Image (cartoon, grey):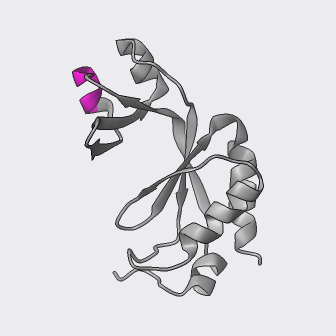
Amino acid sequence: MAGETDLDRMLATLDVERRAGTFTFVTGDWPALGSDAVATIDEDEGRTFVVPVGSARVVGAPVEFEAAWLTLTVHSALDAVGLTAAFGKALADAGIACNVLAGYHHDHLLVPVDRSDEAVALLRGLSSR
């Protein structure tokens, strides 16, 4: 199924789902975290794991950022233009940090857990513009 490329249609159909749990980013040599990782990113400096906070704490990994995982349910195309800028601006204007992971079907946003309800409301508000 091809993803949507029209920004107006993406925004009109945008909704948000929150994944259960609280997540954090961990880097370094934490072999036990590999099976708990919900995302990994390989960088020159090393591998980053996105894991549940509880998993990080069990192995003694530092928890520097506790995040809610929000998924935009609109199926945006990988070459779509403007969606990231639209939600990024809305969250930035509200002072909400946002770390973005792009999947094949959806964009996934990790936002501070204590601001997640506000982030969801702002993102849903984009569809009414």
Q: Residue at x 71, y 62 (%)?
A: 90
Q: Is residue 122 left or right of residue 4?
A: right
Q: Position of residue 113 (x, y in %)?
A: 64, 36
The residue at the far front in this view is 44
Numbered label tally? 0
The answer to whether residue 61 is left or right of residue 122 is left
Prevailing SS of the magenta stretch: helix
Task: Pinpoint residue 61: horizontal percent, then vertical percent.
Answer: 39, 18
Left or right: 27 in relation to 19 = left
View extreme (left): residue: 31
Report the magenta residues as a range: 30-35
Please tell me which residue is depicted at 77% across the width and 78% down the height of the picture. 129
Q: Which residue is rendered at x = 53% and y = 34% of the image?
A: 21
* Residue 46, quarter of picture: top left
**Quadrant occupied by the N terminus:** bottom left
Q: Is 105 included in the stretch rendered in magenta? A: no
Query: Which residue lies at the image location 46% right of the left edge and 73% below the top edge?
Result: 75
x and y percent of residue 73 in the render?
A: 53, 65
Which of the pair 81/1 is nearer the observer?
Answer: 81
Q: Is residue 57 above or below residue 72?
A: above
Judge left or right: residue 106 versus residue 40: right
For the residue pair 89 and 31, the one nearer the viewer reads as 89
